[in-house]
Image (cartoon, helix red, strand yellow):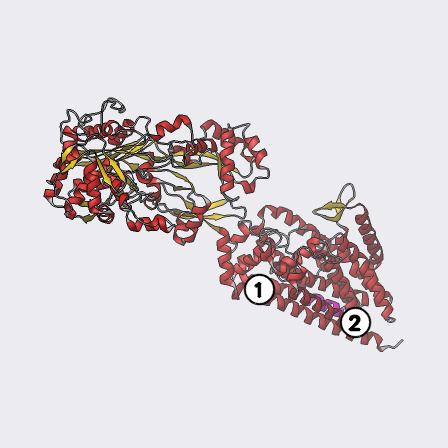
Amino acid sequence: MDLKAPEQQLSRFRARVAAAGVFVLIGFGLVVARFVYLQVVRYEYYATRAEENRISLVPIAPNRGLIMDRNGLVLARNYSAYTLEITPSKVRNLEDTIDELSTMIEILPKDRKRFKKLLEESKNFESLPIRTRLSDVEVARFIAQRYRFPGVDIKARLFRQYPFTEFAAHALGYIGRINQKEMARIEDDEELAANYRGTEHIGKTGLEQSYEKELHGVTGFEQIEVDASGRAVRSLARTPPVPGNNLQLTIDAELQRIAEEAFGNRRGSLVAIEPGSGGVLALVSTPRFDPNLFVDGITPDNWDVLNTSLDKPMVNRALNGAYPPGSTFKPFMALGALVTGKRAAHVAISDPGYFVFGNNTFRDDKVGGHGMVDMIKSIVVSCDTYYYTLANEMGIDLIAEFMGKLGFGSRTGIDIEGESIGVLPSQAWKKKRFKKPEQQKWYAGETISIGIGQGYNAYTPIQLAHATATLAAGGVMFRPHIVKYVIDAQTGAKRVIEPVPIANLGFKPEHLDVIRKGMVGVNTGGTGARAFAGVKYEVAGKTGTAQVYSLKGAKYKESEVHERMRDHALYIAYAPADKPRIALAVLVENGGFGAAAAAPIARQVLDYYLMGIKPKGAVTDDVEAEE
Amino acid sequence: MIDVRGFVLKLVRPLDPALLSILAAIMGATYLVMLSASPERMSAHIVNVTVSLLVMWLVASQQPQRLQNLALPLYILGVLLLIAVALFGDVSKGARRWLNLGFVRIQPSELLKIAMPLMLAWYFQKREGALKVRDFLFAVVLLAIPVGLIIKQPDLGTAILVLGAGFFVIFFAGLSWWLIAPVAAVGVVAVAGVIFYQSQICAPEVAWPGLHDYQKHRVCMLLDPSSDPRGKGFHTIQSTIAVGSGGLLGKGWRNGTQTHLDFLPERHTDFILAVISEEFGLAGVMCLLILYCLLIGRGLLIATNASTMFSRLLAGSITMIFFTYAFVNMGMVSGILPVVGVPLPMVSYGGTSLLTLCLGVGMLMSVKQQRRRVAR
């Protein structure tokens, strides 16, 4: 063997060691490059990621503002209660979990049903209540067994409560859990989305909906350090929530109560407005419903009852019921005649008890007619013939133009969303309303019944009350509003919802005088005289009875038909007649004569508001009264 | 009178001062890191360190000749145990790695980290002066048997370490560059291909020949950790965040948020480097790298000066084991290598790996002693 071999071998080995050394340096060089990249080049990015990991922004939902009547009586408030909540995504078998929970805590079938409904409407990672309002004993029982139920927890939450249940339900509205559609709308607006993190409820109808912005408040945030499993370690910073603003209403709770009770179990609506400000004193729609049912998510059973009832309690008749005004339209027609100069007050017509136009005969209520009738008498006795002829003389478009100024057929702008516009008939309206050319034409004969508030006429009670209030205020029109003050819950500072005069229609005093005399006459010697017998103040009013034409899609039921085919009873009034403090419109669905069904309700409301007299009970029909 | 001084000198004689100081520096640093990452394991860690150092001293006091004699029996024992694992091993977390001997559960693959280089060094020593290509082929077979068995368990991390240890023996023994170059080229092309065709080959319906599903996932998660941030990509994502957010100087000892809020998985074992990176920043990582470089440099120097082929190959390959460990672990923590379960040498908590590594250091010291003895 070559002696040099070991030497050669050794030098070869050394070369290999050198190669290994280079290899090590290259390898570590790569590592160093990577660490420099991560720790120097990308430092900002990873530092941010680490902070995001560690800090969790937990929203603190603000307390919702209270709603009070004009005297400070609380109509919607919050209370704190414990709820048992399940986060479906964290629970393996939902049914089993609920079954097991129900061995400790009472979970009724209706709770399960409601939960199922919430589940369908929600995303999986939300925590949803299975039971609300737990008792202390139930809370304690669950806490002891909590470890057995991952994904189930007890939370303290604020709940909305309407302490007087059905009282003023349509005006107040209700809140309910935010649904997917609302969520999508909220998430469209970045600021809104941030403010609704942590909020589960939102106003759905009524004031709760319209004043959502004021009532909600500003969500607070707590910066919490969390560990990898999301458990809070410590609080880093806290921005307290700003509670929602309170609302003080123009509504007088006692007046509202008297008005609601006056309806008894009849369907209808009453709207009372302060003429000089547009402040709504009472807004009634019957039958009523209990808004508390909606707060935690309404059970399907309750919803079925409310939704399928023929009485449609969920409809706010004051804003969304459109009815022909009947004879309550006449004072406005008369005013229109004076303002447009189509007929002077002293001009009298002879009423034979009917009016012939073309091939049609339009009948007056009174067989044989009222004899010679001037404007004042036409209102007092509610002479139809007078208004048949007047409507014919004015023509539909002039009527529409004048009534449109009074707010008929357009939204009054009341601070509750979703108001209907009703129907103010005119040539243009008909053209738009119908598709076939032969239906689009307005026939002069159609104008005749418009004059007595029938025909295509359909207005909401708020429009009728609004027009009456405008009349009472001498043509100065205010936007009707229910909220008087928005009150800062922290400082108590009041922000007045200013009465905004929308328009001054500039009615002449002598014209208004005629109308007032006629309307006062209604209650002293006319159709409203019986309802207002012995009254201590002067009331300008007008009764109305509107024919019901059709069942409007309701199912045919023999027992129901008769009652529901009856006329709607109406009444409008303002009082005191010389210096009006209140204007109102009353509607009783299928109530029959306005004088018999609607006027007595108005009497009770006016008696209380002007004299402080409380009624003895609900109004019963004055069977003797006649139109 | 008892010669205390002489006795102590005799005790420390086998220990290499340079290696010992590097080791002391690494372990001192580890002590600090462990106090932050997992103070509750401190006492266990100290026991592990003590036992490992004792074993190191014991091995360092041996003649390399003695280790040489152990090579074949250890290798055979190791392979037999691996076969036993394959037949009767306990399954835990989807892998068959452990063998229950009734009184103790052992992981025979760990033994191979030492037995493999011993065996190959012994083999090449035997064939010294007459090395033929055939010998290299035989060495590859010797290497492939245990590596194959370990991959089958499956335990990719240990397989890489055993493969690395064996490969470096063959490499130092003088394996022709003409054989190394093509293999390296194929490897580079394969890695580049995987990265380039990531979206296709990582599709869920594609199965990788010869690899387990979880191994495929590890590689795919590495290429795109964001594809499964809550599942398999979690380790890599959180670890890179910990590293990156450490910056130049770190967040300070015990101030690592990723570490202390449990975002970092395995923070006292495989991912302890992420703790160092987070709390001591790039500076801490560089210090550790320098210590490893010194350790490796010292090891390679000992290898160069070793007197026999056996001890040269043994020292060289054992030194390179440290590199393999460190490189794979650092790559894993910083997100450039798949998560294969390789600890950070001398730092990660865990008795077995610490013992193995100290055994290796002991062998280095033993080789160094031999040179001194020969020189004298």
Q: Nearer the viewer, residue A155 or A182?
A: A182
**Do residues under tags 1 and 2 come within 8 Å of each other at their CB atoms?**
no
Which residue is rendered at x = 36% and y = 45% of the image? Answer: A241
Q: Nearer the viewer, residue A259 or B74?
A: A259
Q: Secondary structure at mark 2?
A: helix
The chain ID associated with circle 1 is A
- Residue bounds of the magenta highlight: B296-305
Q: Nearer the viewer, residue A287 or B351?
A: A287
To the question of a shared chain for discs 1 and 2, the answer is: no
Q: Secondary structure at mark 1?
A: helix
Residue B210 occupies which quadrant of the picture?
bottom right
**Residue B179, numbered label:** 2
x and y percentages locating residue B214 in the rendered image: 69, 53
Q: Main secondary structure of the magenta part?
A: helix
Q: Nearer the viewer, residue B236 or A289?
A: A289
x and y percentages locating residue A356 in the rendered image: 23, 39
x and y percentages locating residue A283 in the rendered image: 28, 36
Which amino acid is tagged 2? Leu
- Residue position marked by numbered label 1 in the rendering: A35
x and y percentages locating residue B376 in the rendered image: 78, 68
Instruction: State the CA–CA distance, disc 1 to disc 2.
Output: 33 Å
Q: Residues within 10 Å of mark 1 (few under 14, many from 20)?
A: many
The chain ID associated with circle 2 is B
For this view, does B191 lie left or right of residue A104? right
Asked if residue B214 shows in the view, the reply is yes
Q: Residue furthest front?
A: A359
